[in-house]
Image (cartoon, rainbow, N blue to C red):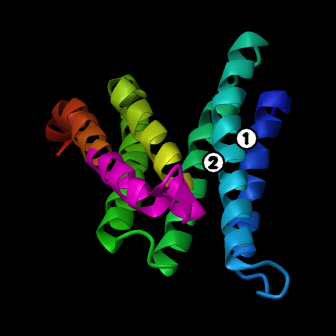
Amino acid sequence: MPFNLPIALTWLRVAAIPLLVGIFYLPSNWLSIEEKNIFATALFIFAAITDWLDGFLARRMKQESAFGEFLDPVADKLIVAAALLVLLNMDRVQVWVALVIIGREITISALREWMAQVGASRSVAVHMVGKLKTTAQLIAIPFLLFNGQLLGIHSTQLGTWLIWVAAFLTLWSMFYYLQKAFPQLTNRL
């Protein structure tokens, strides 16, 4: 397993997951709910930035690796799922949204694994719609975590609209990848 700065940033994102969840379980005499929201939002934004930064650095420093290409999307999926479960627990996101996003991630991960086993992984390689989906999720979730006023707008209202857009893009990307895999699926059944 290679270890370099881009992979270290990805591991940092994985390590942020228990911190993100744990913040909300701290006693209220340690941090108020508003402070918990701020810390969780800042931590998630930091993680989202490392998602972009680790890929940029890997390409720039010519440190791309198969392990990094595997770990990066896993870290993304884990932190998004953890944040959605926290938000679901606090009634800041609807159950259907969490199910759509988490269900899609499981479905497409399984599809990609199967396509790799049959030698057709290129047909389900990352596409722009998948990148848009991830970007929409990484923008929406901080608004939901913050749960306060931003420039006269309640962040949860804005975050809810954005997470609905993210859920739509999530479904779109799932159908896109399933369509690309369909010929292989029908030939092998």
Residue corresponding to mark 1: 10
Tell me the CA gap for discs 1 and 2.
Answer: 7 Å
Left/right of residue 52 with respect to residue 179 in the rendered view: right
Q: Is residue 165 magenta?
A: yes
Q: Position of residue 184 (x, y in %)?
A: 22, 33
Q: Position of residue 117 (x, y in %)?
A: 42, 38
Position of 13 relative to 84 (above/below): above
Residue occupying image coordinates x 72% and y 44%: 46
- Locate the N terminus and report the quarter of the image it occupies: top right
Query: Residue 59: which disc?
Result: none
Task: Kindly identify the amino acid type of the residue bearing the numbered disc 1.
Answer: Thr
Q: Position of residue 142 (x, y in %)?
A: 56, 53
Q: Nearer the viewer, residue 17 or 30?
A: 30
In this picture, which residue range is highlighted in magenta?
Answer: 143-168
The residue tagged with tag 1: helix, strand or loop? helix
- Per the picture, the main secondary structure of the magenta-coloured stretch is helix
Task: Kindly identify the amino acid type of the residue bearing the numbered disc 2.
Answer: Ala
The residue tagged with tag 2: helix, strand or loop? helix
Query: Disc 1 vs disc 2: Cβ atoms closer than 8 Å?
Result: yes
Residue occupying image coordinates x 58% and y 46%: 76
Q: Nearer the viewer, residue 84 or 120?
A: 84
Residue 75 visible? The answer is yes
Q: How many marks?
A: 2
Residue occupying image coordinates x 77% and y 46%: 11
Q: Is residue 82 magenta?
A: no
Left/right of residue 69 with respect to residue 180 in the rendered view: right
Residue corresponding to mark 2: 75
